[in-house]
C-alpha cells in the first residue's frame, strides 16, 4: 500500500508511506534482480514500512532532500532492520546521495548498530567505505541456529565491535572482536566433526570431549578477512568440563569461515539507487 499526504502543521511538508505485509513483495517491485539475494533474509522479516518526508519546497528545488524511516520485521521476527537518514536528489546531474544516519539490525536476541555512512547512486567501491559494527548482547544459541551449526547448543551473550571496509574487493572485515558477557556454556557434539577436529589420536579425542560440555568464564571470538573461505575466525575460551573436574581448561580454536556466511546473510543490503534514479528520470520525461 502506498499513501501520500500534504501536512500543513506544524510545518508544511509532503509525506509518503509505503507498507507491505510481505517484505519480498517490495523487493520484487523495486529491485526484482535482487530477490534471490534477499529471500533468505526477508522471508521471516515481515512486515515492511517505509516513510519519506520532504518539505513542500522540494517540488521546486533543484536539490531535493527527503528524510526516510525504514522498518522491517517486528520483535517477533528472526531479524529486524530499522534505518533513518536522508535521500538527496540533484536534478542538475540526476544524482542521488543516500545518507544512512542510523541503522540497527536486530538479530539473535541482540542488535548490530552500523556507524553512519553515505553513498551515491553511482558508487562502485571507490574510494573504500569504512564502517564500524557495534554488536550488543547477541544470544549465542540463537546465533548458532541462524548459522545452522549442527550439534551446537550454547548459553551466553556476545558483544563487541567489528570494523568493516567495502570497496571494489567486496566486504572485508578488520580485526573484529566479540567477548562474552560473563559466564556461559556450550555443547558441541555433531554427527560428524569438521576436518579440523577429526583424528584418532588422544589429543583430538580430548579436545572433542572438552567441547561436548564446556562451562566457560571467558569466551572471545576474533575475526578478520573477506566473507568467504578467506575469512579467519578464532575462538579462545577459559573454563571447565565436568568430565575433567575443576581444572581450568584453555581453548584456542581456528574455525573455517562459517561465520562469514552468517555475517554476509545478516549484513547484505539492497541498493535501490539505480532503480530510484531510473524512476526519477522516467518521471521527468
Image (spheres, helix red, strand yellow):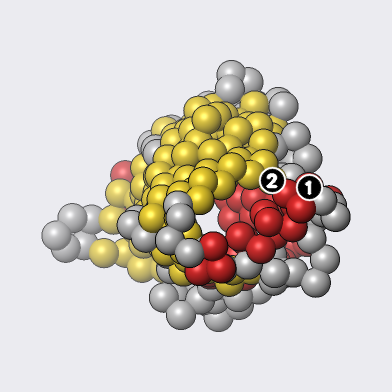
| Side of 232 relative to 48 (left or right) | right
Residue at image coords 59%, 19%: 127
Q: Quadrant of the C terminus?
A: top right
Q: Between 6 and 168, which is closer to the camera in this rendering?
A: 168
Nearest-to-viewer mark from 1 and 2: 1
Dot 2: element: strand
Q: Is residue 143 visible?
A: no
How far is the residue under mark 1 from the one under mark 2? 8 Å
| Side of 253 relative to 191 (left or right) | left
Pointer 1 and pointer 2: residues touching (CB < 8 Å)?
yes
Residue 23 position within the rendered picture, expressed as x and y whole percent measured from the top left: 60, 71
Q: Hey, which quadrant is residue 235 in on the image? A: top right
Q: Between 250 and 191, which is closer to the camera in this rendering?
A: 250
Q: Between 209 and 164, which is closer to the camera in this rendering?
A: 209
Residue 216 position within the rendered picture, expressed as x and y whole percent measured from the top left: 44, 58
Residue lying at the far top in this picture: please name it: 127
Q: Hey, which quadrant is residue 36 in on the image? A: bottom right
Q: Which residue is mark 1?
A: 196
| Mark before the other along the chain sequence, 1 or 2 | 1
Residue 171 position within the rendered picture, expressed as x and y whole percent measured from the top left: 64, 35
Against 181, is 154 above or below? below
Residue 54 position within the rendered picture, expressed as x and y whole percent measured from the top left: 35, 51
Q: Which residue is mark 2?
A: 255
Against 129, is 139 above or below? below
Q: Hey, which quadrant is residue 3 in on the image? A: bottom left
Residue at image coords 16%, 63%: 9
Dot 1: element: helix
Other residues around mark 1 within 10 Å, as few (<14) / some (14–19) / many (≥20): few
Amino acid at each position: 500500500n502506498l499513501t501520500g499526504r500534504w501536512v500543513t502543521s506544524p510545518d508544511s511538508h509532503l509525506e509518503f508511506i509505503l507498507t507491505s505485509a510481505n517484505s519480498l513483495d517490495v523487493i520484487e517491485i523495486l529491485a526484482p534482480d535482487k530477490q534471490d539475494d534477499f529471500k533468505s533474509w526477508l522471508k521471516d522479516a515481515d512486515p515492511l514500512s517505509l516513510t519519506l518526508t520532504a518539505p513542500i519546497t522540494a517540488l521546486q528545488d533543484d536539490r531535493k532532500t527527503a528524510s526516510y524511516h525504514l522498518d522491517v520485521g517486528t520483535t517477533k521476527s528472526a531479524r529486524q532492520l530499522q534505518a533513518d537518514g536522508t535521500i538527496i536528489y540533484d536534478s542538475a546531474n540526476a544524482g542521488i546521495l543516500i545518507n544512512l544516519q542510523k541503522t540497527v539490525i536486530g538479530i539473535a536476541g541482540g542488535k548490530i548498530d552500523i556507524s553512519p555512512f553515505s553513498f551515491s547512486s553511482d558508487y562502485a567501491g571507490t574510494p573504500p567505505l569504512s564502517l564500524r559494527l557495534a554488536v550488543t548482547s547477541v544470544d549465542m544459541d540463537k546465533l548458532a541456529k541462524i548459522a545452522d551449526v549442527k550439534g551446537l547448543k550454547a548459553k551466553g551473550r556476545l558483544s563487541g565491535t567489528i570494523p568493516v571496509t567495502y570497496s571494489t574487493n567486496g566486504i572485508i572485515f578488520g580485526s573484529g572482536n566479540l567477548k562474552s558477557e560473563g559466564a556461559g556454556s556450550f555443547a558441541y557434539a555433531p554427527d560428524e566433526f569438521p576436518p579440523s577436529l577429526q583424528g584418532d589420536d588422544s589429543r583430538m579425542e580430548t579436545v572433542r570431549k572438552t567441547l561436548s560440555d564446556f562451562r566457560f568464564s571467558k569466551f572471545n571470538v576474533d575475526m578478520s578477512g573477506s566473507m568467504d573461505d578467506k575469512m579467519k575466525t578464532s575462538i579462545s575460551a577459559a573454563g571447565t568440563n565436568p568430565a575433567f573436574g575443576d581444572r581450568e581448561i584453555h581453548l584456542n580454536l581456528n574455525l573455517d569461515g562459517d561465520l562469514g556466511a552468517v555475517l554476509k546473510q545478516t549484513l547484505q543490503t539492497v541498493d535501490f539507487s539505480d532503480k530510484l534514479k531510473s524512476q526519477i528520470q522516467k518521471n521527468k520525461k
